[in-house]
Amino acid sequence: MAELLRRLLRTPQGLLGVLIVGLILVIVVCGPWLAPYGPDTMAPRLRYRAPSAEFLLGTDQYGRDILSRLLYGARSTVILACLATAFGTLAGALIGTTSAFLGGRADEAIMRTIDAILSIPSLLFALLIVNLLGKSSFSAVMAIGIAFTPGMTRVTRSVALAVTKQDYVNAAIARGERGGYIVLREMLPNVVAPIVVEMTIRVAFAVMLFATLSFLGLGAQPPSSEWGLMVAEARRFMHLSFWMILWPSLAVALVAIGFNLLGDGLRDALNPRT
Amino acid sequence: MNVLEVKGYGLDYATPTGFVRALDSIDLAIARGEVLGLVGESGSGKTSLAWAIMRHLPPRAREQGSISLAGQSLMTATESEIAAIRGRRIGMVFQDPSTSLNPTLTLGQQLAEVLARHRGLTRRQAWAEGEAMMARVGLKQPAAMMRRYPHEASGGEKQRVVIASAFACQPECILFDEPTTALDVVTARQILDLFAELQAETAVASLYISHDLALVSRVADHVAVLHRGRLVEQGEVDAVFDAPRDDYTRRLLAAVPRPDHRLMTGKPAAGAEPLVEVERLSVHYGRTPFLSALAGRRTAQVAGNREVSLSVQPGEILGIVGESGSGKSTLARALTGLNRFEGAVRFGGRRIAGRRDMDRGYRRDVQIVFQHPDSSLNPRQRVREILSRPLTLYGGEARIETLLEQVRLPAAYAERFPHQLSGGEKQRVAIARAFASRPRLVICDEITSSLDVSVQAAVVELLVDLQRRNGTAYLFITHDLNLVRQLAHRIAVMYRGELVELLDIDDLSTTGPRHPYTRKLLDAVPPPREYKS
Amino acid sequence: MSPSYFVKRLALIVYTLFVVSLVVFGITQVLPADAAVMLLGENATPDALAAIRDKLGLDQPVWVQYGHWLWGVLQGDFGVSLRTGQPVAPVLLEALGRSLTLAVLTIALMLVLALPLGIVAALRRGKLADLLVSIVSYVGVSLPEFVTATLIVLVLADWLQLLPATGFVPLTENFWDGLAHLALPVLTVSVILIAHVSRMVRSELVDVLHTDYVRAARLKGLSRRSVLFHHALHNALLPTITIVALDVGYLLGGVIVVEEIFALPGIGRHLIVAIQTRDLPSIQAGALIMAATYSVVNFMADLAYAWIDKRIQYG
């Protein structure tokens, strides 16, 4: 792990990514303790305030402190996005490796179907599933997870297939190793790295997608301080205070940038040959 | 007067940890009509020298000394002067024609563009001239060849096109960077003949870069030996080969496989029960994908092997030779259960009709070593884990350290990852892994072809030693005829999936080969010239 | 391009559309435990439930429902909107036209900006220009459309008052006014695409510039310019066709969001309204049309690629 971190910090992307994602993790874990006010503490006489010493990022239409809302909202935004990605990755990895393993006709049939499902744009797919499950954070997580599954299946399968063609796998087969050993010890360590990279980058995408769903009114519901929802609510009051809409927008963007950078950094750091 | 002259040339590359010396005080000169062979192993700096002469160096290069073409300094020339010299006054032929030609332009376009650029011809004139050049380099149907894309031509045809564009503007000097290494032996021989012919005809000054001493001794007048960025020896071919002065040159010469210098003494016991018998073994590649079948397309099944029959005696080394695509590796993969096959294999008296019949005993007794150790060693496992697998599978009291010692590697290597080893060391680890289960047959699939000559010699010596100690039989697959003639008891020749000839090494020198293809192969690779050690 | 490749690709798109129709129909009509209750809510009267079951054929077996729906779709009949009582197809097709205008303008803007950016970054690799392009593209791919839209509206519409923030004027009615109304949505959706495509173009071109054949061309004495235009660009830009076609997926998602934000009456906005009002036939039709658009674009991209790249001959 220490070795990986050292390699990660060597590239500018990795360094920045670690810093940003590290900061986000601190906020996710300690956000509620760091927040100066409660997320729902209203102050009718202190509405639409610009940033000041009292309210570092200003206040919203109910006079709630935006900084505190952001710090609380980090949990619902980031953790749910990570959950959705993990779910999609797990399902995709399962289908992808199975398909690569089966090979032949079965592989072709599975992959053609996956390709077909991939032709439904992710946001649209997510919308359909939200429509099925109803508006809520939970259904947004499910929707994103399911929407990610075909893409992750593709990635996993192509990585697994490339590894199967390596001579160290051939050598293990020729040596008479059991299937379990070949999959777990020879293939898996070489398959995991590219999938971790893909997953990290997808967290960025999941954060964006989740915020978008909330923004459209189909994800987190008020009074949650999920960031996409905060943007959506702030739109009506844009002319009264643009800070309200600016901060949560920037927060979403920062998280996405952080995970994108970290993913690219990991890609270099996890390559055993460099 | 010398056409190309390199004086006191030094080259360093800047790295984060300081400068790394690539070339050091290089002096060489090539006169009109002369061929200088530049010999060196990988990492010796021979390619760096070629890039330096072509003025194609990365920005992090630092240089000293001088390089001049017919008295004009190339190092002080401006970029536009260099562009006018490249292709016009210095040509270059590259190693691999399949990557040095643009896949999306026709061969004609790529040849004509040089003519249009340097000789000021119109497109029509350049095309006509290109066609003439195609004919001159021995391409049949030059007009049709002009319109073809690289993927529609064979490797030999493509290399002829590359040669045609190098000679197109009658340059004073041409650099040949391993021009036959990527080609099959028979094709390589034809390209060499073409080179000799054009060289004599045009009297161009040639720098012929190669790792192959034997080959250089045939094409060059002078030879220069490059070792770790320094020219350790230079002189006329005869002088260098007859009386090498430098120690490295001597080692290099000694490492060249010579068919008359047999490494294997003795013969396998005659009349003994054969260890392996391969009976009419066929492998078919390719299957018609569902959608293609739907589209009414029948893909012809590509035959990997067609009814190959042969046998190996205990302790025998059977060499298998043939060009790429002849089915050598397919046979190896079938025997180790990596390919489905028809026919049967009889091993130790037991009949094996398919992959299911390959039990633990068979797996233990038959081991394989692959061509590229980079791919055959798992990059995420340490050497210790790599070597411990066959031990846990098949027992044996051998320790990791003993296995490493057996292949002459230090015991400390057990804790290393493959990427921390050199190519030769990696291949030794792969060999150690194969021998760990004390097999009776080891299949060596081109195991030395990615290694340097001197490393190859050491690996081959190791194999001979292991054979002597363990009495293991080898199926030694290679495209290097001279090497296999040093090593094998019998040679099987494969051509387009079929076994065309199986001959005893003694018969080869007395009665000679019977099949015309075998004769062609042998003619393509004459034994290297003798040198007195 | 061989005829068998065409036939194979055609068979594939038919299969794709079939799977898509199954998924769309399955998620919307079959999977809900009781679609009628889901549509009307728990408090619906038995009469209303019965009416809607009858209307959508929910009493029939699943396969009959699907077959019935598919048969209608194949004839251009997507059913009747539960919200307006009007046939879905004509309304949706009109909306699709507006969305396509938006999409085509976006792709045009994206190509005009992304290709030069990617090429400059690749040619000036490691220099300031490359760094700038790479920072811009990192930020670009990390901005969800609703964030971009917010920022763009704040700056261009609110502060500078250059362009209208909402509304739609058909191009046929008043071209310049229509264009002005489309400017912000187009800008919004294109940000993420420009960022992504310029990054891909850069990496493709960097790879191609390092190939042996480009080096060989340089060593034949061809000028930088001629190497770039004759040898490198052609090969580097070929994969862009595929990348752009795949990005149409993002584009369609983006279209949904910006139509909602900028109040453009396109197919995306229709879909959101349909989902919020649980207008089943409209949801099915909208989703199917979007997915079909995407598949058809990719089909055409593959054909174009095969036509341009002579190497593709596999059957």
Image (tube, coloured by chain):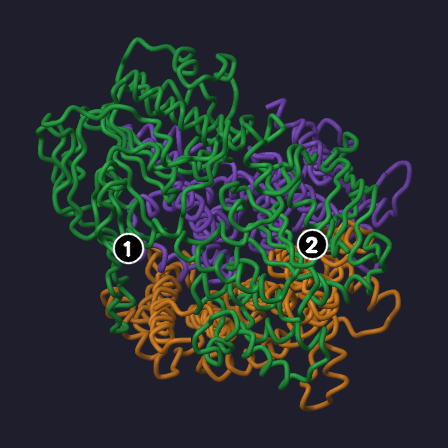
- The tint chain C carries is orange
Question: Quarter of the image holding residue B444?
Answer: top left
> In the structure shown, which secondary structural element does the residue marked by tag 1 occupy?
helix
Whether labels 2 and 1 belong to a single chain: the reply is no
Type of the residue with mark 2: Leu
Using the image, determine if residue C25 lies above or below residue B179.
below
Inspect this view and state whether residue A236 appears: no
- The tint chain B carries is green
Residue at 65 percent across and 74 percent down: it is: B113
User: Could you classify mark 1 by the number of other residues whose Cα lies within 10 Å: few (under 14), some (14-19), or many (20 or more)?
Assistant: some
Type of the residue with mark 1: Tyr
The chain displayed purple equals: A
Frontmost residue, B136 versus C172: B136
Q: Please state if A40 lies on the left or on the right of B98 as rendered.
A: right
Name the chain under label 1: B
Q: Position of residue A242 (x, y in %)?
A: 82, 55
In which quadrant is the N terminus of chain A drawn? top right
> In the structure shown, which secondary structural element does the residue marked by tag 2 occupy?
loop
Name the chain under label 2: C
Q: Which residue is mark 2?
A: C143
